[in-house]
Amino acid sequence: MEDVTRLVSSGDCLKIWDSTSMTVLEQFSPHSATHPVAQVCWSSSNQYLVSASSIGDKLVVSSLKSSPVPVMELGEGKKQTRVSLNSTSQFLVSGGLDNTVNIWDLKTKRLHRSLKDHKEEVTCVSFNGGDSYIASGSTSGEIILHSITTNLSSKPFGHGPNVPIHDLRYSLVKRSLLGTVSDSGSVALWDANTQKELHLFEGTHKAPCSGLAFSPANDLLFITVGLDKKIVCYDTSSKMVFRNKQVESPLTAIDFTPDGAGLVVGSTQGRIYMYDLRNLSAPVKITTAHKTSVTCIRFQNSTSKLKVQLSTPLGTPGSRCYSPSVVQTPPPIKEEESITTPPQQTDVQNGSKVDFFLFIIRYVFAFIDFIFYLDCRQVQKNNGLRQECDVTSTLPAAQSVNTYNSPEPAQRRDLPTQLTYDSPVSGAPAAAAPAAAVESGAEGRGAPLTSIQMNFVRNMIHEALEDFRDTCHRDIINLQVEMVRQFYIQLNEIHGLIEKYSVNDSLIEEIEKLREENKRLRANY
């Protein structure tokens, strides 16, 4: 079971699939059989499922260790229809028909906090990547971000009044990027730190947009589906739609495969379509999954990210997975700055390649400068430090030795003291290397670089330059595309002006006829 990548779908019941063969592994219904399951999500260990029904009768936590068994029920009668777990599966956020957003502590099985910022039904909820904010959308068109650390909510923002939000997702790569889809068919990208709209895609869907998903492998790709039977692919960098795909029935749910190479969508007819992103012309597999429409599709969490967690038994101090049978103390949620002020040190966490390049370049130049510093000391040693020997000839021998071991201020470099980063080679602070090298120099021995250090610096420079080259190449391509687009815009405008102000043949013929008529009139009268 552990080697199988599982997929869960919800509709009239919950079904767990083998995503490779699309065969049903488990099928069960933890809610009332008369109402479909509205949403479902995996725990971080892939051993539990949390589900909510369309009428909001209760929230159910089901164990998948053997056969599916409900192990916990929360929020009975609170009309909660949307669920989302944080990264450690120890806190659950839900929203629903009573216009509230609730945070549940799965350790104590109690309601931790209730947020009543929305005025209408809550249609989607989600934790951000750092588990410090909760994003929620409602049928009134309002999106609200709530800080768990400060217990403060942002001002409502969204697509506009009375434009219901159908789904919202955070980017898996760039943590501050938030995507939303609405009943009007528009798709918007937001900066979650400032709540500012980055781009609005209008008219991409001719009917309500029902879901979106960010690629887990490509920070530039996200895809939306809608009731207009369309799958639309977007580029977050150029803010362009680069592919459309029409299917046979309206679509209601979407998710990427864990490796980012595939796509799975659900339809109102209860079918599940699996696509390979390298060829969207036809689905790889079509499976009839539910008697009702597919309300939610979720792949299990990537197994590569769970190797450390799965190697630790549930309930031990090193375990971060939730186990209803074992009491665990939830880890403290890291504090972040207020939602109105964007964090100052989240660029690397947000996938900012610019800061990564600056870090690599700063590290490499510091390393090279340190090598130059050692060379200077070696040259001074070999030349006998003639100038200093003249000055120190009258000093005691001990003082002369101290002067010999300390380089001149003009030759002393400050950058070696900046090597405070962890060395990827030995795991020790890189500042230890300069200290050891100076010590070895004081003993009269040289400080040559080992082959491992040279290969490390060489590979680091090559990788940084390769990433920089790819970034420049992509920017140049985007620039060329923009230039071509502007060229065609100008070309169309020029054609329009030519047609507007060029010589009109019919008008010239009419003028000639009038001239002839005028001549006849003058001749006769």
Image (cartoon, rainbow, N blue to C red):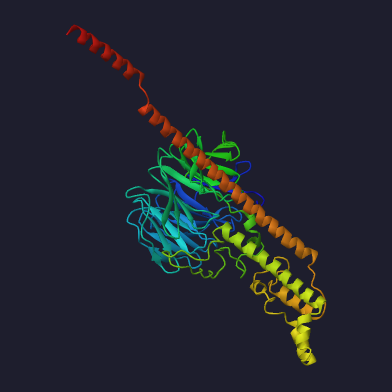
Name the side, left or right, on which 468 lies relative to 198. right
Residue 333 lies, in percent from the top left, at 50, 68
Q: Residue at x 19, y 6 (%)?
A: 524
Position above or below: 26 against 291: below
Is residue 14 shown to the viewer in this render?
Answer: no
Residue that protrudes farthest toward the left in the picture: 525
Q: Residue at x 73, y 62 (%)?
A: 456
Position above or below: 131 against 486: below
Residue 151 lies, in percent from the top left, at 41, 68
- The quadrant of the rendering that contains the C terminus is top left
Q: Nearer the viewer, residue 55 or 172?
A: 172
Q: Nearer the viewer, residue 490 or 160?
A: 490
Q: Nearer the viewer, residue 63 or 340?
A: 340
Position above or below: 264 against 151: above
Residue 84 lies, in percent from the top left, at 48, 56
Position above or below: 388 against 30: below
Name the side, left or right, on which 516 lies relative to 183. left
Is residue 399 shown to the viewer in this render?
Answer: yes
Residue that protrudes farthest toward the top in the picture: 524
Name the side, left or right, on which 194 lies relative to 15. left
Residue 206 lies, in percent from the top left, at 40, 37
